Image: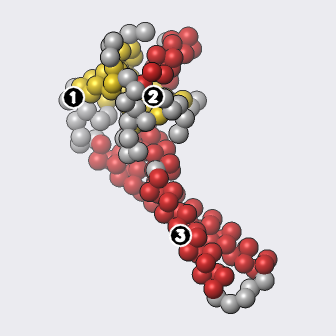
Amino acid sequence: MNGVTIVLTRIDYFISQMRMQARHPVNLGGWLLLSAWSSFMTQRSGNPSVLTALVTVVVLLVSCAFFFFVVAVIVSAAMALIARRERGVLGEHVYRFTDSALVESTSANENLIKWGGVRSLLRTRHYFYVRVTYGSSYTIQRRCFADSATDAEFWKALQPLAAKKVW
């Protein structure tokens, strides 16, 4: 497998940012801390019945999750809007394999991703995600492959990039 050429659109970038925001450890930790604090405050406010405490905790958990989702949408939308001005973020990306790495090339830059240097790989119905750090990943649309065999071959070729395959 030599590689693939994709065109990263604003919507692809937005979806990628949403996926990263939803799984970022700081965001997950914030949600858990806010939920734990809410539960503690509920228990501290008197001696509520078990049902009242449970309902309050569930409502607070859902409220916190909704709050973090709204923040993720706003941040992701802002990043997608800003990406227009950043050369090399949107547009054509060429991914090709060498003996030692996966190389990503754009009109503005070239990045080398060495074998074993990736945190994780993820394959969804529409995308491959190559996560380099908690905050950055490469998004490769599966629609850019000519057929399912080429898609599967590319996925297999990505495997040496990371020991951990799912995030």
Viewer-nearest of labels 2 and 1?
Answer: 2
Is 21 situated left or right of 65 in this image?
left
Q: Is residue 26 visible?
A: yes
Label 1 crowding class (10 Å Cα cut-off): few <14, some 14-19, many 20+?
few
Q: Give the spatial CA distance, label 3 vs label 1.
A: 40 Å
Three-letter amino acid code at the position of disc 2: Ala
Q: Is residue 106 visible?
A: no
Q: Which residue occupies 58% across, 30% down?
A: 125
For residue 149, which quarter of the picture?
top right
Label 2 crowding class (10 Å Cα cut-off): few <14, some 14-19, many 20+?
some
Q: Secondary structure at mark 1?
A: loop
Judging by the rendered image, the residue that carries numbered circle 2 is 162
Is 97 situated left or right of 111 in this image?
right
Q: Which residue occupies 68% across, 90% down?
A: 46
Across and down, in percent, residue 146 comes to: 49, 12
**Between 41 and 148, the one nearer to me in the picture:** 41
Q: Which residue occupies 32% across, 13% down?
A: 98
Across and down, in percent, residue 142 comes to: 50, 24
Three-letter amino acid code at the position of disc 1: Asn
Q: Earlier in the sequence, mark 2 or mark 1?
A: 1
Judging by the rendered image, the residue that carries numbered circle 1 is 109
The answer to whether marks 2 and 1 mark residues whose Cβ atoms lie closer than 8 Å is no
Judging by the rendered image, the residue that carries numbered circle 3 is 34
Q: Secondary structure at mark 3?
A: helix
Across and down, in percent, residue 44 comes to: 63, 85
Viewer-nearest of labels 3 and 1?
Answer: 3
Q: How is the image coloured?
A: secondary structure
Viewer-nearest of labels 2 and 3?
Answer: 2
Is 117 situated left or right of 64 in this image?
left
For residue 92, which quarter of the picture?
top left
The answer to whether marks 2 and 3 mark residues whose Cβ atoms lie closer than 8 Å is no
